[in-house]
Each structure stands twice: as C-alpha cells, then as structure tokens.
Image: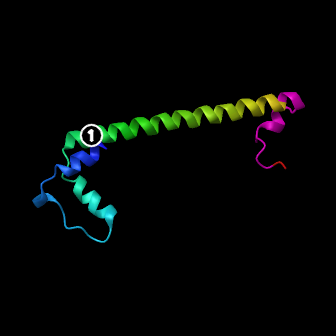
C-alpha cells in the first residue's frame, strides 16, 4: 500500500514505457523510488526472513526432540540412531 503511494508520486516523465512484462515495468518504476524507502522495504523483508529462519530452526529442534523421545521409548541405542530414521521404513 505504501509502495503504491510512492509509485504514484513518480512524475510521468520519469516513468518507463509500459511493456508487455508487468514485472519488468514495476522493477523499472521502483528504480525511481527514494533510496531511504527502498532501505526500509529491504529491512522489513530481512526481518521477515530472519523470523522465518527462527521458526524453521524451532521446527527442526522439535523434530529432533520428538525423535529422541521416540528412540528412548523404543530403546534404540545411540549407535543405531546416529544416522537418524531417514533410511528406515
């Protein structure tokens, strides 16, 4: 929404000719946005991706803990579980 408002502020003489590819047109339009605005956008994207990486790490650790609990319950020794359950059916 904020980006759309910024794009509308670009003077017509600075806008590229609209082509068939809308993605290219929008990318060329963005080249005329203020660098400060682009920095804020990139920071926001970085924070979102960093948050997602944290969620992936949490999910991974939950899988590890669940596997450890299941192996302890089944009495699987450490030497058997060092390769995980990937190849087992």
Name the side, left or right, on which 46 lies relative to 26: right
The magenta segment is: 72-87
Quadrant housing residue 58 = top right
Number of numbered discs: 1
Q: Position of residue 54 (x, y in %)?
A: 53, 33
Q: Position of residue 69 (x, y in %)?
A: 79, 28
The single residue placed furthest to the left in the displayed view is: 13
Camera-nearest residue between 77 and 27: 27
The N terminus: image quadrant: top left
Camera-nearest residue between 62 and 38: 38
Q: Which residue corresponds to the image point at 31% horizontal and 71% vertical from the top-left?
A: 20
Q: Position of residue 80 (x, y in %)?
A: 83, 38
The single residue placed furthest to the bottom in the displayed view is: 20
Name the side, left or right, on which 58 lies relative to 13: right
Residue corresponding to mark 1: 39
Name the side, left or right, on which 46 lies relative to 38: right
When the figure is inspected, residue 74 is found, relative to residue 28, above or below; the finding is above
Secondary structure at numbered mark 1: helix
The colour scheme of the drawn protein is rainbow
Camera-nearest residue between 36 and 20: 20
Q: Which residue corresponds to the image point at 89% horizontal and 32% vertical from the top-left?
A: 74
- Residue 80 part of the magenta segment: yes
Q: Which residue corresponds to the image point at 79% horizontal and 50% vertical from the top-left?
A: 87
Q: Residues within 10 Å of mark 1 (few under 14, many from 20)?
A: few
Camera-nearest residue between 7 and 55: 7
- Residue 75 part of the magenta segment: yes
Q: Which residue corresponds to the image point at 33% horizontal and 37% vertical from the top-left?
A: 43
Q: Position of residue 60 (x, y in %)?
A: 64, 36
């Amino acid at each position: 929404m904020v980006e759309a408002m910024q794009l509308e502020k670009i003077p017509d003489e600075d806008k590229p000719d609209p082509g068939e590819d809308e993605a290219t047109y929008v990318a060329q339009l963005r080249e005329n946005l203020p660098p400060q605005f682009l920095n804020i956008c990139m920071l926001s994207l970085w924070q979102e991706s960093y948050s997602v990486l944290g969620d992936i790490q949490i999910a991974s650790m939950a899988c590890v803990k669940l596997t450890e609990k299941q192996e302890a319950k089944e009495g699987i020794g450490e030497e058997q579980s060092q390769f995980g359950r990937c190849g087992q059916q």
